[in-house]
Amino acid sequence: MYWLRQLRRQTQTTQFVNPKAFSPAPRSITPSVPDALRLQDALLRSEPLALLRERIRDSKARFDAVQDCVPAAMLNHIQPGPVDEAGWSLLVANAAVGAKLRQCIPRLEAALKQKGWPNLAIRIKVHNG
């Protein structure tokens, strides 16, 4: 009972203060993370990414140049792959498409040469995914 009387006395004598009355003025909050760049802007600003973009464009252009040499039924199963100093890769959906496409390599190389592309080895890679 004694502690209850002490609690009543404290609450009767204590003045309640509005905590908002003593809070400092609100500060403007600046984000700690800068605005994100769009992928296109990042590709244009970064030299390594610009080189990657150029290789992707080169690969797609080569693929467009050889599409007439590939049977139409196989086109949905082939994607252009990376181009590097050693050659150009074509990504195929399965081994059967890869085997058939290997038979077309001489025609693909001839089409690329006829359209002015430098002579690079064509690699066929099975790509799952």
Image: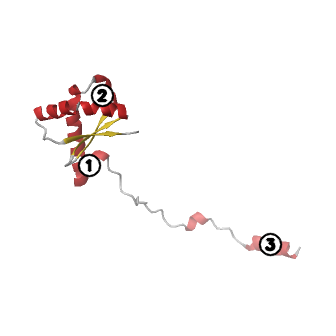
Residue in view at x 17 percent, y 42 percent: 120
| Residue 109 seen in the figure | yes
- Mark 2: give few (<14), some (14-19) or many (20+) Cα within 10 Å: few
Q: Name the residue type under label 2.
A: Leu
Q: Is residue 88 left or right of residue 10?
A: left
Q: Foreground mark, 2 or 3?
A: 2
Q: Foreground mark, 1 or 3?
A: 1
**Can you name the residue that lies furthest to the top here?**
72
Residue 75, label in figure: 2
Q: Name the residue type under label 3.
A: Leu
Q: Foreground mark, 2 or 1?
A: 2
Residue in view at x 28 percent, y 23 percent: 72
Label pair 2/1, CB-CB below 8 angstroms: no
Q: Is residue 24 left or right of residue 62?
A: right
Mark 3, residue position: 7
First in sequence, mark 2 or 1: give its number: 1
Residue 43, label in figure: 1
